[in-house]
Image: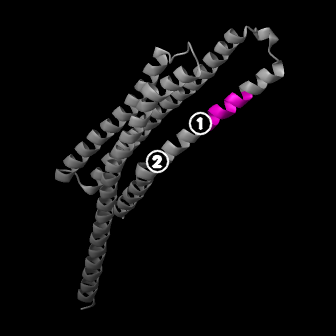
């Protein structure tokens, strides 16, 4: 009689445990679905923001900067290699984003059909981490392009001023030269650093935070599987 009661109690406890695991898995599934929906929304926002930025950068490279150089200084034009580097960095940023979107939706579409939750989380996290590395590579290239454009502009402006005034480098006050170099470095650091921080903040806001949340969900799912 006691053995029968023990069996019934064990069966009830097992049923409750199974129900709890099912509920937990359902909660994790809903959380993952919610995160994916937010990523989908942010991809659309990213497309719009990136499109506007590329237009602004192209406007600056081909119209604004050349026109300013033409109006402010005679005989100075934007070097072809600098224009190419600016276009290359813009195209690289756009290409990495398009590659990420294609890969992301390919993984998402495949996992909607065949993947389980664990596999879906792993593949989406891998895709986001890949895009993170590509994004920072493209961002580094863009920062180099901005830095070289700034240095090239300062150099050409200084060279032209020397030629027009007929002065020589030996005539320049060393203290003034050092001051100009220091101010140039500070200005370059503020420009490059500011753009970098803004773009990095935008990436983290749109995608970076979801990497952490997806990793947390994956870890909870793995702990549930171990239990």
Mark 1 nearby-residue class (10 Å; few <14, some 14–19, many ≥20): some
Please name whichever residue, 47 or 16, is drawn nearer the observer in this view of the structure.
47
Mark 1 or mark 2: which comes first in sequence?
Answer: 1
Task: Tell me the residue that label 2 is attached to.
Answer: 202
The main secondary structure of the magenta stretch is helix
Identify which residue is drawn at 31% across, 74% down. 20
**In this rendering, position of residue 209 left or right of residue 191:** left
Q: From the viewer's perspective, is residue 160 above or below residue 47?
A: above
The image position of residue 3, as x and y in percent, is: 26, 86
Identify which residue is drawn at 68% across, 15% down. 161
Residue at the bottom extreme, as displayed: 1
The image position of residue 16, as x and y in percent, is: 29, 79
Q: From the viewer's perspective, is residue 103 above or below residue 108?
A: above
Identify which residue is drawn at 27% across, 73% down. 18
Please name whichever residue, 225 or 98, is drawn nearer the observer in this view of the structure.
98
**Image quadrant where one finds the N terminus:** bottom left
> Magenta residues, as a range?
182-191
Task: Tell me the residue that label 1 is attached to.
Answer: 191
Instruction: Tell me, for residue 167, which label it has, or none.
Output: none
Tally the marks: 2
């Amino acid at each position: 009689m006691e053995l029968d009661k023990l069996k019934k109690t064990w069966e009830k406890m097992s049923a409750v445990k199974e129900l709890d695991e099912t509920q937990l898995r359902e909660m994790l599934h809903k959380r993952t679905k919610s995160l994916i929906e937010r990523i989908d929304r942010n991809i659309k926002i990213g497309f719009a923001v990136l499109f506007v930025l590329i237009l602004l950068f192209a406007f600056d490279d081909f119209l604004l900067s050349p026109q300013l150089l033409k109006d402010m200084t005679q005989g100075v034009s934007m070097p072809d290699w600098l224009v190419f580097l600016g276009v290359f960095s813009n195209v690289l940023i756009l290409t990495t984003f398009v590659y990420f979107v294609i890969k992301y939706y390919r993984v998402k579409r495949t996992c909607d059909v065949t993947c389980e939750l664990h596999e879906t989380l792993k593949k989406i996290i891998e895709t986001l981490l890949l895009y993170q590395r590509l994004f920072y590579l493209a961002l580094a290239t863009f920062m180099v392009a901005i830095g070289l454009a700034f240095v090239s502009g300062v150099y050409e402006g200084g060279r032209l001023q020397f030629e027009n005034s007929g002065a020589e480098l030996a005539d320049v006050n060393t203290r003034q030269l050092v001051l100009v170099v220091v101010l140039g470095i500070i200005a370059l650091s503020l420009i490059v650093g500011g753009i970098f921080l803004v773009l990095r903040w935008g990436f983290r806001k749109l995608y970076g935070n979801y990497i952490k949340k997806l990793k947390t969900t994956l870890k909870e799912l793995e702990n549930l599987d171990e239990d």
